[in-house]
DNA sequence: AGGCACGAACTATGGGCATTAGTCATCTGC
DNA sequence: GCAGATGACTAATGCCCATAGTTCGTGCCT
């Protein structure tokens, strides 16, 4: 008989794990079932293996969550950067704000992961977070904010957007969140323009 | 020998539990070790008993967290209300904002509990949350915000304050948070005044 | 081609947590 | 005093993270 022992050629699911693919599966789990559902057991189940196998590629749950945070931060930063290309002033702010909220609603798990505190790997995290703050800074510059106040303005902006998004995610915004968000943008725009004098 | 068998008269810790005292201990644990440390095991240990004993007074962890949320919300609302008595306009806003941040820094666990989503016991939660929104509404009125926009203004205010506080709690505000917070207040004040026209 | 080393999966195990069920002591009211 | 209710306990289940030790397949080296 001619069949050589093609050992596992039948399995369509790639039986080969990697750090990269595990993080991608973790992102799926986070967005679909919440960041809290990112457990080794759940990710392993999605990956078609058992939890201990993940330790060959990832140094435990904390390490996986760190990696998830970095990937999510970079991804979020991309979305924000894209939102302000070729836009200036209040229009850019408007676009930035909506990109923020849209991203959070579309990828809640990734956004939550973004907020993770990482004492180790701090420099990596700061580097990734710069992807968020740098486009925000340029955008605020076009609003007329002086350089000396860019940091403060950036934090105020982030506070407002994060506050609304986080409240909306945790079901703490009542009805008509879209119009409430429009008011947040209104207040931020006026307030930041006042900062520009 | 005259000693009668004084069974447990030595124990100074009151061996009697109650729903009330359990919630108070949970509040302690939340503020001192974070909301995530509020587990039945931890609370029981602080109470000097075993976890299953808590079930005589509380219907599981979720019930305890619900109760914690209600107590924390009422407590937080008191602090906010106190902050604006006999104050109007921007000064009241300034005082309200600082009361918010101070409370969060002093009682992080309670503040986190405040954000809990409670599909059951929704009406109780709304009632408690009114303790926050009503004084905020009156305060915003004194800023000149028209009644038709009080809801929006309240949400924008809450977004800004919650956003900053939550970021500060999760170590996402860099150095000099006090001055960053001053900028948030500045932006909110200008923005809300603009809403008043 | 055969053997060996390594990578990557597994099973087995332990500890922590929430929760339930069943047991026993204590306290109260008659 | 005594009976029933109250409230604490122990024991046991199930899910989770994590570690240790084992097995199996692949591929390199001779």
Image: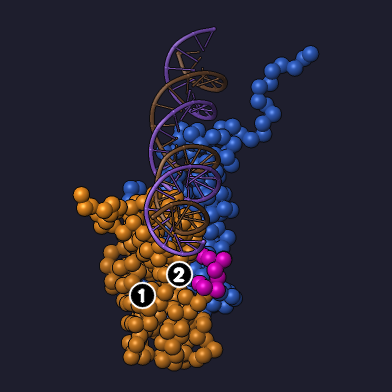
Chain colours: A orange, B blue, C brown, D purple
**In front here: A29 or A81?**
A29
Image location of residue A72, percent across then percent down: 40, 69
Residue A100: mark in rendering: 1
| Rendering coords of residue C12 (x, y %) | 46, 37
Please, which residue is most extreme toward the left here? Answer: A1
Position of A84 relative to B157 (above/below): below
Specify start and end residues of the magenta stretch as a single range.
A117-125
Res A70 label: 2
Sort mark 2 into few (<14), some (14-19) or many (20+) by Cα contacts within 10 Å.
many
Callout 1: SS: helix
Q: How many marks?
A: 2
Q: Is residue C17 left or right of residue B155?
A: right
Identity of the residue drawn at 36% across and 59% down:
A16
Q: Position of residue B176 (x, y in %)?
A: 59, 76
Q: Is residue B117 magenta?
A: no
Q: Is residue A37 visible?
A: no
**Residue B149 appears left or right of A3:** right
**Residue at 67% in and 26% down:** B9
Q: Chain of mark 2?
A: A
Identify the element where label 2 is drawn. Answer: helix
Query: Tags 2 and 1 in contact by the CB under 8 Å rule?
Result: no
Which mark's residue is nearer the viewer, 2 or 1? 2
- Whether residue A147 can be seen here: yes
Binning the other alpha carbons within 10 Å of mark 1 as few (below 14), some (14 to 19) or many (20 upward) gives many
Cα distance, mark 2 to mark 1? Answer: 17 Å
Q: Chain of mark 1?
A: A
| D30 sits to left or right of A75 | right
Numbered tag placed on residue B64 in the rendering: none
Q: Is residue D28 left or right of residue A105?
A: right
Q: Are marks 2 and 1 on the same chain?
A: yes
Question: In percent of the image, x 35 and y 85: which residue is there?
Answer: A84
Question: Which badge, 2 or 1, is on the more N-terminal residue?
Answer: 2
């Amino acid at each position: 008989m001619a069949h050589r022992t093609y050992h596992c050629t039948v399995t369509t699911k790639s039986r080969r794990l990697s750090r990269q693919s595990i993080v991608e599966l973790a992102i799926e789990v986070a967005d679909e079932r919440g960041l809290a559902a990112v457990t080794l057991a759940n990710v392993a189940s999605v990956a078609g293996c058992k939890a201990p196998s993940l330790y060959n590629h990832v140094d435990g749950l904390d390490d996986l969550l760190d990696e998830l945070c970095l990937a999510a931060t970079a991804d979020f930063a991309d979305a924000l950067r894209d939102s302000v290309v070729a836009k200036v002033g209040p229009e850019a702010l408007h676009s930035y704000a909506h990109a923020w909220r849209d991203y959070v609603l579309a990828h809640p798990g990734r956004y939550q992961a973004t907020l993770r505190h990482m004492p180790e790997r701090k420099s990596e995290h700061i580097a990734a977070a710069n992807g968020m703050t740098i486009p925000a800074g340029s955008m605020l510059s076009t609003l007329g904010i002086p350089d000396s106040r860019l940091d403060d303005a950036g934090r105020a902006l982030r506070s407002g957007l994060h506050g609304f998004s986080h409240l909306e995610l945790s079901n703490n915004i009542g009805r008509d969140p879209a119009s409430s968000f429009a008011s947040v943008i209104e207040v931020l725009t006026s307030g930041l323009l006042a900062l520009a004098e």
